[in-house]
Amino acid sequence: ATERTFSIIKPDATKRNLTGAVNAVIEEAGLRIVAQKRIQMTRAQAETFYAVHSERPFFGELVEFMTSGPVVVQVLEGENAIAKYREVMGATNPANAAEGTIRKKFALSVGENTVHGSDAPETAAVEIAQFFAGNEIVG
Ligand code: CMP
């Protein structure tokens, strides 16, 4: 089925001027960017977004990193978009990411790993709603 997933191009990528390079991989994979904006995430936004990880030892570092520079938040649309994008991103740790994936090409470490993508339909809906109004998504 046609799905929507939520994507973030993280500060390690925006700092290295890789927004277009990441978007090229996304589009070549057949996913359509139906919403996109460049923002500076606030600490409150990052803490809300990653609330599920709040007890993890890396939570503080994660919030610091995600607020360390601009990010590009996106909605991607396509057939099986959620699973498809996770495939295109590659493993969380770039050391384990498959050839041709975004993280294999661009990620620096498990923290500075270039992109985020939703892991399930329920989380995709919540994540999209945190950053986009309905009329900002144009399919
Ligand atoms: P993301 O998909 O954005 O969701 C949670 C993030 O936590 C994950 O990507 C990683 O970038 C980050 N993360 C996971 N494990 C670690 C770790 N050991 N150290 C720092 N960051 C981590």
Image (spheres, grey):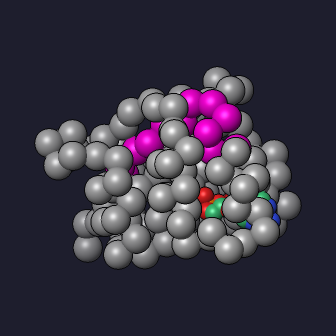
Please tell me which residue lies in front, 101 or 82. Answer: 82
> Residue most toward the front?
44
**With respect to residue 100, does 34 lie above or below?**
above
Q: Quadrant of residue 64?
A: top right
Q: Residue placed at 41% from the left, 56% from the top? A: 6
Q: Residue placed at 35% from the left, 75% from the top? A: 122
**With respect to residue 103, does 65 lie above or below?**
above
Q: Quadrant of the N terminus?
A: bottom left
Query: Which quadrant of the picture is home to ligand 1?
Result: bottom right
Relative image position of residue 9 (x, y in whole percent): 56, 42
**With respect to residue 84, does 47 lie above or below?**
above
Highlighted magenta segment, given as a residue range: 65-76
Relative image position of residue 30 (x, y in whole percent): 40, 52
> Residue most toward the left?
135
Indicate whether residue 101 is drawn in magenta: no
The answer to whether residue 5 is left or right of residue 63 is left
Query: Could you tell me how many numbered marks the image carries?
Result: 0
Residue 39 seen: yes
Relative image position of residue 67 (x, y in whole percent): 61, 39
Q: Residue placed at 63% from the left, 44% from the top? A: 66
Please tell me which residue lies in front, 92 or 39. Answer: 39
Residue 84 seen: no
Indicate whether residue 69 is drawn in magenta: yes
Please tell me which residue lies in front, 124 or 67. Answer: 67
Q: Residue placed at 63% from the left, 69% from the top? A: 54
Relative image position of residue 59 (x, y in whole percent): 70, 61
